[in-house]
Image: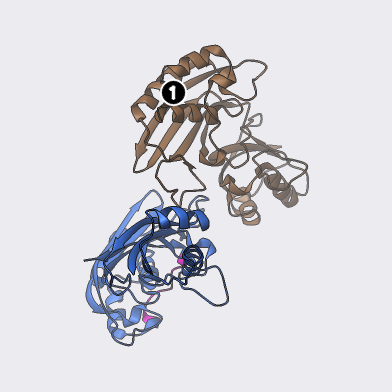
Chain colours: A blue, B brown
């Protein structure tokens, strides 16, 4: 038995998200499992670090796969890549210690949310940005981001509260902008369902003057979803990196 | 009679090029003309600065249109944009002097050719780069680019020789690279059919060690297409800007 860690990039535009579903072939996990099982001749489970929603992209999703024996070098990055659609790429394969699990072993995640603030949506980034044609006050956004950084109960900022705990640690939220593009980068211990998209919607409301930076703290304390901002659309979100010890 | 200058961006992936064709609706010119004529109620001709091939992109194509009278402000950037596919955007409309013609009045053009040199094609740029997984010697490419800069007979570097003259002036060719991406920027008086793509293929052959920088000069003198390099694929090419006095 051999455990492999895969690093995977995908353009989520055409997919119904990471997680395998009975009623569609258009999931990343489903496509990888079907292809790998087809190559090995036995069912292989591909465990992701987490689910990404329909339309969300990944530059560095990770997954673990347990094979019955050692695979030839380049089995994933060569053979499997050759058999899957070109908008999904296994960019790295690593033989790791048995027991490694992409989700359970993860200690942190990095997401980025990309916004096109131009008057007209950029034709080249329209699949990879949320088009939000407002002049954004980046310093107000960064101020609000500062309030959200740290160890907090983020019950407000999710659409499905984790039953064990709604506390999460956010190490950093970095707001940056250049030439009609604003990027919000999130580094944290982990994020609940829709959490990054709701945080992004909230920060965009702050940036466009619809709410004050301080209001995100009141919202945090309220534990009420309706106190947070809108759910920013999936196409602006990228899972950049999953961290392990 | 009023003349408008339009600046247009398009993702060429889904199109059969700029020029209107009888046998397909998938051309940029065809789509713009159909939409504008539909709005004005009379046939309107949209004259581009030049044709772009099937699959080629534009960040700053220009076109001129003559209307029978003045249009309301935002007619093109608002009304027309609202009725055409989102991978074509009129980014700017300007009322200009009658007599302006996007092609005849142009005095220069800027193109960029984008190359993804990574081992695996980047899932997010695969529509906008040519994937050429070689380590490129940028200084050799820049040296060859220097030989091609200036006023030369470029008969070698086209697939359809201009009958009037095959001389063109290239003001600059700039080769730059960063993080698995190489960009070749061309600024010139004008370019013949396939010229930028053939120059790019030739420079990529230089960069990957398949030919010497000096060989581009011998090729230039030969006036024989087969002395030039390969035709680099359309998806890496962008028309960035058209210049006027």
Mark 1 belongs to chain: B
Figure quadrant of the N terminus of chain B = top right
x 46%, y 61%: residue: A130
Residue beneath disc 1: B211
Query: In which quarter of the view is residue B83 placed?
Result: bottom right
Location of residue A52 in the rendering, given as x and y in whole percent from the top left corner: 42, 70
x 33%, y 67%: residue: A3
x 58%, y 51%: residue: B87
The answer to whether residue A86 is seen in the rendering is no
Residue bounds of the magenta highlight: A227-234
The answer to whether residue B45 is seen in the rendering is yes
In the picture, measured across the screen, residue B237 lies left or right of residue A185, that is right
Q: Against B212, is A166 above or below?
A: below
Q: Count numbered badges in the picture.
A: 1
Location of residue B67 in the rendering, given as x and y in whole percent from the top left corner: 71, 41
Q: Characterize the local packing of mark 1: few (<14), some (14-19) or many (20 or more) Cα atoms within 10 angstroms.
A: some
């Amino acid at each position: 038995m051999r455990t492999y860690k895969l690093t995977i990039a995908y353009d989520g535009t055409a997919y119904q998200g990471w997680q395998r579903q009975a009623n569609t072939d258009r999931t990343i996990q489903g496509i990888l499992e079907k292809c790998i099982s087809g190559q090995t001749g036995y069912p292989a489970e591909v465990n992701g670090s987490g689910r990404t929603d329909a339309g969300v992209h990944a530059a560095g999703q990770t997954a673990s796969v347990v094979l019955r024996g050692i695979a030839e070098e380049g089995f994933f990055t060569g053979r499997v890549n050759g058999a899957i659609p070109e908008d999904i790429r296994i960019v790295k394969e690593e033989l790791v210690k048995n027991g490694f699990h992409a989700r359970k072993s993860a200690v942190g995640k990095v997401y980025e949310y990309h916004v096109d603030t131009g008057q007209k949506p950029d034709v080249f980034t329209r699949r990879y940005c949320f088009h939000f044609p407002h002049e954004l006050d980046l310093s107000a956004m960064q101020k609000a981001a500062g309030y959200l950084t740290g160890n907090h109960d983020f019950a407000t900022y999710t659409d499905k509260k984790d039953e064990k705990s709604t506390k999460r640690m956010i190490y950093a939220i970095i707001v940056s902008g250049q030439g009609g593009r604003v990027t919000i980068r999130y580094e944290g211990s982990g994020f609940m369902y829709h959490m990054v998209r709701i945080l992004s919607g909230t920060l965009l409301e702050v940036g466009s003057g619809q709410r004050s930076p301080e209001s995100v703290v009141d919202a945090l304390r309220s534990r009420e979803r309706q106190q947070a901002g809108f759910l920013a659309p999936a196409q602006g979100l990228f899972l950049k990196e999953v961290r392990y010890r």
